[in-house]
């Protein structure tokens, strides 16, 4: 069975067949799904999905590119919902300098990243970290806030093996998805081959980033075997070992999952 550590089934691209797709997961070997909120509306939809489907757990947080949704009132609302039994993480939170170049916006991202990291610490929940074009600042912030005290995963990892090992030193996991199957994903392939398997989580980030041979189509958790297969090839082990170890990794990180 496979543990999907990062999906967005609240996304409108699943509106036409969401129920049918989700009800097919078990027969295709998908045991557990962490559905991850990105904006306030997505968090609300995520909480609804956790109530409807026994195998779906939620991560609640505001993505760096959506911080206009954040205020002290919203922060308190998130804090209250962290107590719900099927809220398994705070996320996705972090930094994204790809779209946001303005220094004031970057400062605001860093502020709310720190606040949400502290929320996770307070609520004894792991974090799901998003970092795009912000490698140095993300690592410095996590180190500065004593990230080793706040378990988590760097999702959709896109940096060097050296960066991955810096996070692993703090106890973090590295989320690997469909990009690892792309021919030009040299750094990620190197990372997937080099880091301990005990620090890898499988993810899709669906509906985004479909792996080969489904690249360009809407992604779903049903494509996770392609990711496991490529990691297995890079490491010279079996696909079954990748699925088994990453499942145990995810259950260790997301301790509220039953």
Image (cartoon, rainbow, N blue to C red):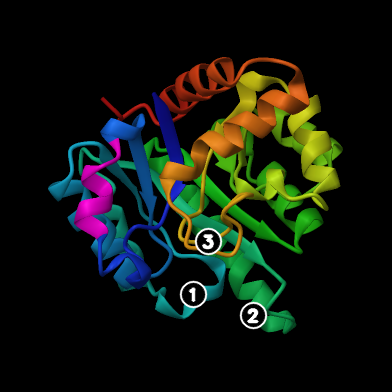
Q: Where residue 57 sits: x, y (%)?
A: 29, 42
Residue that appears at 45% across and 53% down: 91
Mark 3, other Cα within 10 Å: few <14 / some 14–19 / many ≥20: some
**Would you name the residue on which mark 3 appears?**
208
**Would you name the residue on which mark 1 appears?**
66
Mark 2 and mark 1: Cα distance apart in space? 11 Å
Residue that appears at 25% across and 59% down: 18
Above-or-below relation of 217 to 145: below
Q: Earlier in the sequence, mark 3 or mark 1?
A: 1
Judge depth for marks 2 and 3 and give the one in front. 3
Above-or-below relation of 175 to 76: above
Residue that appears at 57% across and 50% down: 129
Q: Which quadrant of the figure has residue 133? A: bottom right
Image quarter where the C terminus lies is top left
Q: Where residue 65 sits: x, y (%)?
A: 55, 73
Residue that appears at 32% across and 65% down: 14
**Would you name the residue on which mark 2 appears?**
105
- Looking at the rendered structure, the secondary structure element under dot 1 is helix
Q: Where residue 19 sits: x, y (%)?
A: 20, 55
Q: Earlier in the sequence, mark 2 or mark 3?
A: 2
Q: Where residue 241 sits: x, y (%)?
A: 57, 15
Q: Nearer the viewer, residue 69 or 147?
A: 69
Judge depth for marks 3 and 1 and give the one in front. 3
- Looking at the rendered structure, the secondary structure element under dot 3 is loop
Q: Which quadrant of the figure has residue 239? A: top right
Q: Nearer the viewer, residue 253 or 50?
A: 50
Magenta stretch encompasses residue 32: no
Q: Which residues are magenta?
A: 18-25
């Amino acid at each position: 069975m496979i543990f999907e550590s990062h999906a967005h089934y609240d996304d409108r691209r699943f509106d036409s067949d969401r129920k049918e797709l989700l009800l097919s997961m078990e027969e295709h070997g998908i045991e557990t799904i962490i559905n991850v909120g990105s904006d306030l509306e997505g968090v609300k939809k995520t909480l609804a999905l956790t109530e409807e489907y026994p195998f779906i757990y939620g991560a609640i947080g505001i993505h760096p590119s959506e911080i206009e949704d954040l205020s002290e009132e919203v922060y308190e609302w998130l804090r209250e919902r962290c107590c719900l039994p099927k809220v398994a993480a705070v996320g996705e939170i972090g930094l994204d300098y790809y779209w946001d170049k303005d220094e004031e916006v970057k400062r605001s991202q860093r502020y709310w990243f720190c606040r949400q990291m502290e929320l996770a610490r307070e609520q004894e929940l792991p974090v799901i970290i998003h970092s795009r074009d912000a490698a140095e600042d993300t690592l410095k912030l996590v180190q500065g806030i004593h990230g080793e005290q706040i378990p988590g995963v760097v999702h959709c990892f896109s940096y060097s093996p050296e960066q991955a090992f810096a996070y692993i030193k703090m106890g973090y996991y590295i989320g690997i998805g469909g990009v690892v199957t792309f021919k030009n994903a040299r750094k990620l392939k190197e990372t997937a081959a080099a880091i301990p398997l005990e620090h890898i989580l499988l993810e899709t980030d669906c509906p985004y980033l479909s792996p080969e041979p489904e690249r360009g189509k809407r992604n779903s958790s049903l494509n996770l075997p392609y990711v496991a297969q490529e990691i297995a090839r890079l490491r010279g082990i079996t696909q079954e070992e990748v699925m088994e170890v990453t499942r145990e990794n995810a259950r260790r990180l997301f301790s509220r999952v039953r």
